[in-house]
């Protein structure tokens, strides 16, 4: 619902945050990608024109506009232009195939799609909510595609006067579709206020300082962590350097960190491992003040390398999920070396409990589901009232993550609730088994899943990528390694070897793909 005019001087919507900095620091560089640099004033002007163009094409308050692009400054412009109108932006994962894209565009009822030229075939056949052909605004020349319009031409023809849209902080800003690890993707509806409060939480929990003004945006912007990475600097007027989507090149990252004197960045643990292994990295001149990671457990060896490679940087473990906008727990690792492996404690403005299936708090040391409430909690799932009601059972948002708290209140992830293996009545938490196997010197990465067993119902199997794929350890060697480190029922019954584990854009291992590939290998 639109808010009253009297509230606008106090508004902290995403569009207004950009406009404020365009007035306050107009010439400061807002975004940089390769050789392209655009100031806050330039970005704001282009966002205004795109918002006017969308309005001229019938986009109104509450309408959905899908953005199917790889990382670019234009992608940021599209995000802000859509939400400045009071419409809802729907980022779409460019790695999806046509049926997956069709589901998201159809589920949200998008009227317009802003799309990269190479991705047009994914959306060209689709219709809007009224059955008409989708309007397409294409970032590359679109002459060959009938009915599509080219991004720069659209901006050049649009009015430069500010849009007169009434946008409230509690209005929906984004629909972020989850990765769909438990079935069809669900669209988490996030408001301007949700995302602003998450930014506040990041400022406090990750100790973002006044000098911490050059962010390296390495994650894909369609992902909640990629979006949230750029919002603090959009709020305070700092610079964000964006990396191209595609193959991760650790040597290129090291060059950018040094050349641009980046002060803060986020990578998943496997990426940090590769960065720390770049030849000569420890002799480079960095300005990093803050480094952070998340998405998976960080092996102690990687934490040690991070400390040795970037000795002057504060290090943080961040934990959360899309539905919570996203960060829920954090810990400054160098302050708590005795809590290695913990995700820390709840960030400001997020309440947490660890509960059993009857919503009773479990005592320290016992495993339960972590549930949340607070101003960063999603508004609901788009067009899924039953899923929304289930997620909010008991008045708290149910994360699906299993954790335990120690006597000091520090939290440790046990597993995803639906990924837990129950073997012969015993609960087996995959991260515990993965950590044991990861410690083997020949193992580069590992994932554990459950498969059927004629006696125990379920049993764990391990999928391993070796440091040397040409000479991996044997299955018997891995099982024997676990025998002395885990209870017998926890050791894997089978071990399969792959060149690399499949991961999504946020770096999380795609266990559904592993189940598809190895789940039918029942272990006797």
Image: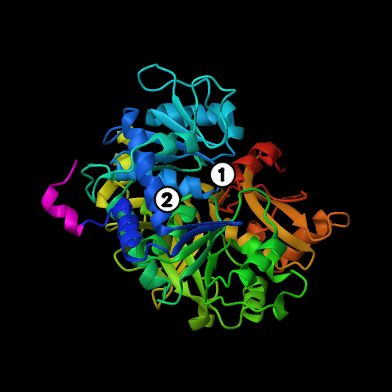
Residue 524, position as x, y percentages in the image: 72, 43
Question: Is residue 161 something that shows in the picture?
Answer: yes
The residue wearing badge 2 is 322
Q: How is the image coloured?
A: rainbow
Residue 352, position as x, y percentages in the image: 33, 63
Residue 5 vs residue 439, the one in the foreground: 5
Q: How far apart, in angstroms, are the residues tagged by discs 1 and 2?
A: 19 Å
Check the picture and name the quadrant holding the N terminus.
top left
Question: How many neighbours does mark 1 have within 10 angstroms: few (below 14), some (14-19), or many (20 or more)?
Answer: many
* Badge 2 element: helix
Q: Where 188 sits versus 6, above or below?
A: above
Residue at coordinates 54% horizontally, 71% vertically from top-left?
Answer: 341
Q: Where 393 sits versus 209, above or below?
A: above
Question: How many neighbours does mark 2 have within 10 angstroms: few (below 14), some (14-19), or many (20 or more)?
Answer: many
Mark linked to residue 94 = none
* Badge 1 element: loop
Q: Looking at the rendering, which quadrant does residue 436 occupy?
A: bottom right
Residue at coordinates 36% horizontally, 34% vertically from top-left?
Answer: 54
Residue at coordinates 50% horizontally, 25% vertically from top-left?
Answer: 148
Residue at coordinates 28% horizontally, 33% vertically from top-left?
Answer: 60
Residue farthest to the right? 470
The residue wearing badge 1 is 70
Tell me which secondary structure the magenta stretch mostly adopts. Answer: helix
Residue 168, position as x, y percentages in the image: 22, 48
Q: Where 241 sits versus 425, above or below?
A: below
| 6 inside magenta stretch | yes
Residue 329, position as x, y percentages in the image: 41, 66
Residue 171 vs residue 115, the one in the foreground: 115
| 181 inside magenta stretch | no
Point out the stretch of residues depicted in magenta.
Answer: 1-10
Residue 19 vs residue 481, the one in the foreground: 19
Question: Is residue 390 something that shows in the picture?
Answer: no
């Amino acid at each position: 619902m639109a808010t009253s005019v009297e509230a606008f001087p106090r508004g902290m919507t995403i569009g207004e945050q950009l406009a404020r900095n365009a007035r306050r620091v107009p010439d400061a560089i807002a975004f940089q990608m390769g050789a392209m640099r655009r100031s806050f004033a330039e970005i704001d002007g282009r966002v205004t024109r795109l918002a006017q163009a969308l309005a001229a094409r019938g986009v109104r308050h509450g309408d959905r506009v899908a953005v199917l692009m790889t990382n670019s400054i234009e992608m940021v412009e599209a995000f802000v232009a859509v939400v400045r109108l009071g419409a809802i932006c729907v980022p779409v994962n460019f790695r999806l195939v046509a049926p997956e894209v069709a589901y998201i565009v159809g589920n949200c009822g998008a009227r317009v799609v802003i799309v990269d030229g190479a991705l047009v075939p994914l959306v060209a056949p689709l219709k809007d909510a009224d059955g008409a052909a989708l309007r397409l605004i294409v970032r590359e020349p679109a002459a060959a595609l009938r009915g599509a319009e080219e991004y720069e031409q659209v901006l050049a023809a649009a009015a430069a006067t500010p849009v007169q849209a009434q946008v409230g902080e509690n209005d929906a800003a984004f629909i972020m579709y989850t990765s769909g690890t438990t079935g069809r993707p669900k669209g988490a509806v996030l408001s301007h206020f949700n995302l602003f409060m998450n930014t506040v939480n990041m400022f406090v929990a990750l100790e973002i300082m006044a000098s911490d003004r050059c962010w390296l945006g390495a994650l894909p912007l369609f992902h909640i962590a990629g979006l949230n990475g750029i919002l603090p600097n959009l709020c305070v007027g700092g610079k964000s350097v964006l990396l191209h989507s595609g193959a991760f090149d650790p040597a290129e990252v090291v060059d950018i960190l040094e050349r641009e004197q980046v002060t803060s960045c986020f990578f998943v643990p496997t990426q940090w491992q590769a960065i720390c292994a770049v030849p000569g990295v420890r002799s480079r001149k960095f300005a990093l003040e803050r480094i952070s990671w998340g998405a998976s457990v960080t092996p102690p060896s990687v934490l040690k390398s991070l400390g040795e490679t970037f000795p002057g940087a504060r290090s943080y473990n961040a934990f959360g999920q899309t539905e919570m906008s996203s960060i829920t727990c954090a810990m400054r690792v160098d302050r708590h070396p005795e809590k290695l492996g913990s995700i820390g404690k709840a960030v400001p403005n997020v309440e947490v409990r660890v509960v059993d299936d009857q919503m009773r708090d479990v005592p320290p040391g016992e495993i339960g589901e972590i549930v949340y409430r607070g101003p960063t909690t999603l508004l609901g799932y788009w067009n899924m009232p039953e899923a929304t009601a289930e997620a909010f059972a008991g008045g708290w948002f149910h994360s699906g993550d299993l954790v335990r708290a120690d006597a000091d209140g520090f939290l440790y992830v046990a597993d995803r609730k639906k990924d837990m293996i129950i073997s012969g009545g015993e609960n087996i938490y995959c991260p515990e088994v993965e950590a044991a196997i990861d410690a083997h010197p020949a193992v580069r990465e590992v994932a554990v899943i459950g498969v059927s067993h004629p006696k125990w119902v379920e049993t764990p199997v391990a999928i391993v990528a070796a440091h040397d794929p040409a000479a991996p350890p044997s299955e018997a060697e891995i099982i024997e390694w676990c025998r002395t480190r885990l209870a017998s029922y926890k050791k894997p019954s089978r071990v399969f070897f792959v060149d690399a584990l499949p991961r999504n854009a946020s770096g999380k291992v795609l266990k559904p793909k592993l189940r598809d590939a190895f789940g039918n290998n029942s272990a006797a």
